[in-house]
Image (cartoon, rainbow, N blue to C red):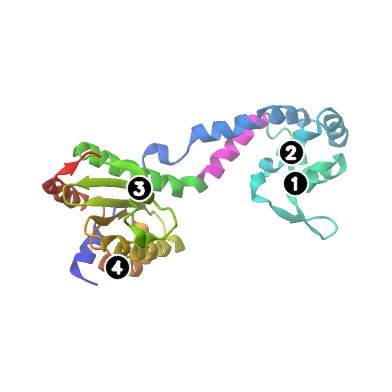
Amino acid sequence: MSDHFKTFLSQLSETNATLDYFTDFRKIKSNVNKIAIKLNQLNYLIGKENLKEAVNELYQENPKVFEVLDILIAIRKNKNAKTFNNKGEIVLLDTYFTSPESILEYIEETGLAEVFRNKDVTNLMDYVFGIEVGLDTNARKNRGGDNMSKAVSLIFDKASVFFKKEVNNTIFPEIISLGADVKRFDFVIKTKKKTYLIETNYYNGGGSKLNETARAYSDVAPKINQYDAYEFIWITDGQGWFSAKNKLEEAYNIIPSLYNLITLEDFIKKIKDEGILEF
């Protein structure tokens, strides 16, 4: 491991999380509002001792109301969750929502029946809001990337660097080495010397995604850098890279312009010396 790469690793930040990183309440509220009418109708079941009778009454009134029962056990409809039924068959979860008998079986077997009878929850809107907060933690990885893009934007703005965001490679037809696939770059900066095509990301934790990213950018960089008028820039950070430092080191040795949030000032100095253009 070279001294330069060791220094690069030592500069990786512990977090890029701002307070809005942890929970996206706007999205949560939107998800709940989409099923609000059905949830309010399902409130009819709360406190009912005779759930069989209550389910039948509600089914006669509006059978579609039970379509949202999956979220009550923290399962999203688009996940196509499967389960064993009482016959030992593997079935889709939402097949339980097609008759009063199977709905009652679902409510009893999941444990929701006791929750309803005992009034452990008093309002399913509030209950699902809480579930959505829990499920939203799965989206934090994406927000980490969004935060990185936001952070880089702020640094560029502070340094008075003109840039464009989310630019497709199709506006650079001379770069034929990328093939027919459309690739979107997070940032593009143009100077009197070169056009810089920039990707950014941030990793708090490990996983196969880091190896895939390093491998992909190691492949893309030479394809772009073979053109004198263009250069690929990768700005990445986060201590998740410690779990994939070997693959990152490989990329570090292949990609001439690999920066983190600390060394990004070196890139800014470079492009200012070249003369930044608006385009």
Q: Answer whether residue 14 is visible to the viewer in this image.
A: no
Q: What separation in Å lies between label 4 and label 3 (alpha carbons)? A: 31 Å
Residue 131, position as x, y percentages in the image: 60, 40
Q: Earlier in the sequence, mark 4 or mark 3?
A: 3
Please name the predominant secondary structure of the magenta segment in the image: helix
Residue 230 vs residue 205, the one in the foreground? 230
Q: Earlier in the sequence, mark 1 or mark 4?
A: 1
Q: Secondary structure at mark 4?
A: helix
Q: Residue 67: give its label.
A: 2
Residue 267, position as x, y percentages in the image: 19, 51
Q: Earlier in the sequence, mark 2 or mark 4?
A: 2
Q: Earlier in the sequence, mark 1 or mark 2?
A: 2
Using residue 103 as the reference point, say whether residue 173 is left or right of it.
left
Residue 157 quadrant: top left
Q: Secondary structure at mark 3?
A: helix
According to the image, label 1 marks what residue?
Answer: 94
Residue at the spot x=75%, y=46% of the render?
A: 94
Q: Nearer the viewer, mark 3 or mark 2?
A: 3
Q: Mark 2 and mark 1 in contact (Cβ < 8 Å)?
A: yes
Start-end of magenta stretch: 123-137
Q: What separation in Å lies between label 3 and label 2 (alpha carbons)? A: 45 Å
Residue 45, position as x, y percentages in the image: 78, 31
Q: Answer few, some or many: residues within 10 Å of disc 3's Cα (few below 14, many 20 plus, some between 14 and 19).
A: few
According to the image, label 4 marks what residue?
Answer: 249
Q: Secondary structure at mark 2?
A: helix
Mark 2 residue type: Glu
Residue 73 painted magenta: no
Q: Earlier in the sequence, mark 3 or mark 2?
A: 2
